[in-house]
Image (cartoon, grey):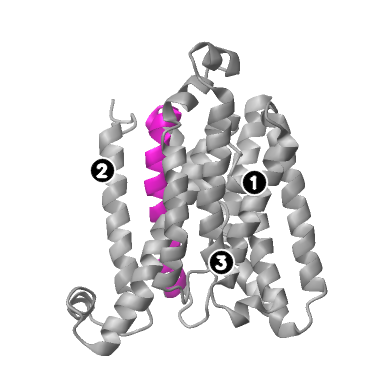
Amino acid sequence: MSSRAPSYPVLIGGLTVLSILLFAASLLIGPAAIGFWDSLAALIAGEGEAATLVMREIRLPRAILGFMIGATLGLSGAVLQGLLRNPLADPGLLGISASASLGAVIAIYTGLSAAFALALPLSALLGAVLAVLAVQALAGAHGGNLTLILAGVAVSSLAAALTSLALNLSPNPFAALEIVFWMLGSLQDRAMTHVVLAAPFMLLGWAMLAGLGRSLDALTLGEDAAASLGVNLRRVRLLAVFGTASAVGAATSVAGAIGFIGLVVPHLLRPLVGGRPSRLLLASALAGGAVLLAADVATRVLAPGRDLKLGVLTAIVGAPFFLWLIYRTRRAML
């Protein structure tokens, strides 16, 4: 049948090629007027001082972070949707993104980010760690999925309220503007220092999440059936929560809050992998990286020189899809 979904190897191969092409586009597209061959020569051989600076210190870390953050959001979204058996789940559900944002806001509000450049991402990472510890403490060792969701919503609401309070009490308008701009999400002006800081935590999170595929497959049969098949539900939940915290916390710490990728990407790919969570993980990671790279390239093409924020673009595209998803889910329940 010509209308059936592509085979899994074909899907993964296609997403890999797409990611490579978009990674190359991220390296080659920008406000600096550098030709194709000059860009390659600067990146590989270091020819031309100005071009080498642009390629190695500006575009390369931006492209690396773009793919890694997109992959983090796609992978964590797929894991949480499989764990909670809810297609509307995303990494923000556990309060990690909001708490990481709060940590960064505190660094800006107190002036730490001005005194020490890495204070902002480090504070955001600390916020993510405290959030997941709070969620786990509230949910308890034997808490179910509903308890976990409610704990995440409570932590997220508290973090959002404290962020609003920091904005309200900001000592000067410049600090408030910096807070708002950071919260909109962006990869602009990121350096290799940010890659070195965030990559280990994201890789650790990936390692914790990647091995959950078979357990998530068993969970599609229900928790009782999964437990009878030997799945340790508590272990799966801990790995999912702490893996998401490590990866998404690190991603948020260097790029700000970027929404909807963790929600949209797994949902779009699920029919193409036969609804199997184990196959969805790698596909969502590759597609998430590709989507974020494409969005970052679009910010440079659509509004050159206007500093269009990445989180704004993903929200503009993702919010209508979210509304459509809610509408379709409601119709399916009738």
Relative to the observer, which residue lies in front, 313 or 287?
287
Residue 11: x, y in percent? 30, 39
**Label 3 vs 1, first from the N-terminus:** 3
* Three-letter amino acid code of the residue under disc 3: Pro
Residue 224: x, y in percent? 59, 13
Magenta region: which residues? 272-300
Q: In which quarter of the image is residue 52?
A: bottom left
**Label 2 vs 1, first from the N-terminus:** 2
* Dots 2, 1 in contact, CB < 8 A: no
Residue located beneath label 3 in the image: 121
For label 1, the SS is helix
Residue located beneath label 2 in the image: 13
Disc 2 from disc 3: Cα separation: 34 Å
Residue at 67% across / 32% down in the picture? 330
Residue 330 position (above or below residue 64): above
> In the shown orientation, is residue 297 left or right of residue 126?
left
Is residue 289 inside the magenta stretch?
Answer: yes
Numbered mark located on residue 77 in the image: none
For label 2, the SS is helix
Instruction: Tell me which secondary structure the magenta stretch mostly adopts.
Output: helix
Disc 3 from disc 1: Cα separation: 17 Å
Relative to the observer, which residue lies in front, 134 or 52?
134
Residue 220: x, y in percent? 52, 21
Q: Quadrant of residue 98?
A: bottom right
Residue 308 position (above or below residue 229): below
